[in-house]
Amino acid sequence: MTTTDSLKDFYNPALGVPWVNNSKMTTAQHLERVKTKCEYEIKITEATSAFSRGDGLAALAIAGWRATIAAIEALEKVDYEFGPPDAVARVLCNAILAAWPEEVL
């Protein structure tokens, strides 16, 4: 994962307080685990009979996991190719972390 730990200091407007990462993982590690989990779920789902039958729900789930992966990869580009993250990147990071608590990884 190339996302730096500077992401842990993002402001979370939903909470009205700065983001504080109280977990044992850094924000970068958390995002990497989310990305790995999404990649795993895509492989598992694509191997199911529901996916091979063209089940719409399976296709939607895969699309959601791919969107999450794309968002994490976009955060990596913001941090490394375009300089320090801005407010939009911070909101995106907080949304991903909130949607993927450690318990589900």
Image (spheres, rainbow, N blue to C red):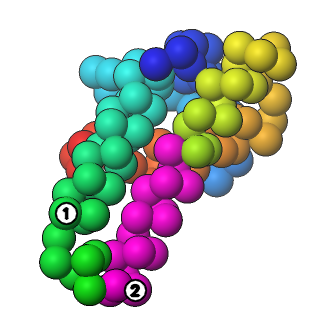
- Which residue is located at x 67 percent, y 35 percent? 74
Q: Residues within 10 Å of mark 2 (few under 14, many from 20)?
A: few
Residue 5 as seen in the image, left or right of residue 89:
left
Residue 92 as seen in the image, left or right of residue 19:
right
Residue type at numbered disc 1: Ala
| Residue at mark 2 | 56
**Exactly how many numbered labels are in the figure?**
2
Residue closer to the observer: 80 or 9:
80
- Which residue is located at x 74 percent, y 25 percent? 78
Q: Position of residue 85 (x, y in %)?
A: 76, 24
Magenta stretch, residue numbers: 54-69
Residue 38 as seen in the image, left or right of residue 85:
left
Q: Is residue 83 above or below residue 35?
A: above
Mark seen at residue 47: 1
Q: Secondary structure at mark 1?
A: loop
Q: Secondary structure at mark 2?
A: helix
Q: Position of residue 93 (x, y in %)?
A: 60, 39
Is 20 covered by the magenta stretch?
A: no
Quarter-of-image position of residue 88: top right
